[in-house]
Image: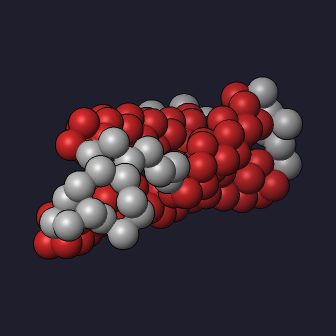
Amino acid sequence: MANPTGTGSMDEGTWLAYERTILAHERTLMAWLRTAVSLITFGFTIYKFFALELGGKAVPKPHQIIGPRQFALIMIAIGLFALIAATLQNIQYRSQLRKASREARYSLSSLVTAMISILGLLAMASVLFRW
């Protein structure tokens, strides 16, 4: 039986399993995206809060190991790393699935992930260059 998209021949059970697998990978990427956005926004919010609180003089006190700016950079960097790692993993899984079926659909969650990555990089630049 041909799959409903008309590309290749696959029985209905196999085609549905293929679709469930693709959707599972999409959900996993979106879960990583939510986690990364939380880390990025939390780090940026901490930075902005303390920048306003200290009047722009985010100088760590002598007994502090890490200041608000360094904490924000670490949180944003972890969020961006999670986003990049999850995207690379998703690309790897999708390429493996393409070998099994010639269907080449684009991933909407990958597009959203790319846009959020750009916003994360802008947040990182904002904290690095104190904009």
The residue positioned farthest toward the top in the image shown = 129
Q: Quadrant of the C terminus?
A: top right
At 47% from the left and 50% from the top, the residue drawn is: 105
Q: How is the image coloured?
A: secondary structure
Q: Residue at x 41, y 63 (%)?
A: 5
Q: Position of residue 10 (x, y in %)?
A: 20, 59
Of residue 81 and residue 47, the one placed in the foreground of this image is 81
User: Residue 27's image quarter?
Assistant: bottom left
> Can residue 60 be seen by looking at this rendering?
yes
Q: Is residue 9 left or right of residue 4?
A: left
Of the 4 image quadrants, the one containing the N terminus is bottom left
Residue at 31 percent across and 59 percent down: it is 22
The answer to whether residue 69 is left or right of residue 103 is right
Q: Is residue 100 left or right of residue 110?
A: left
Q: Is there any visible trace of residue 64 in the rendered image?
A: no
Q: Is residue 16 above or below residue 69?
A: below
| x, y percent for residue 119 | 70, 45
Q: Is residue 75 above or below residue 37?
A: above
Could you tell me residue 21's position as x and y percent? 24, 61
| Image coords of residue 84 (percent x, y) | 45, 36
| Residue closer to the observer: 105 or 38 | 105
The total number of labels drawn is: 0
Q: Nearer the viewer, residue 105 or 39?
A: 105
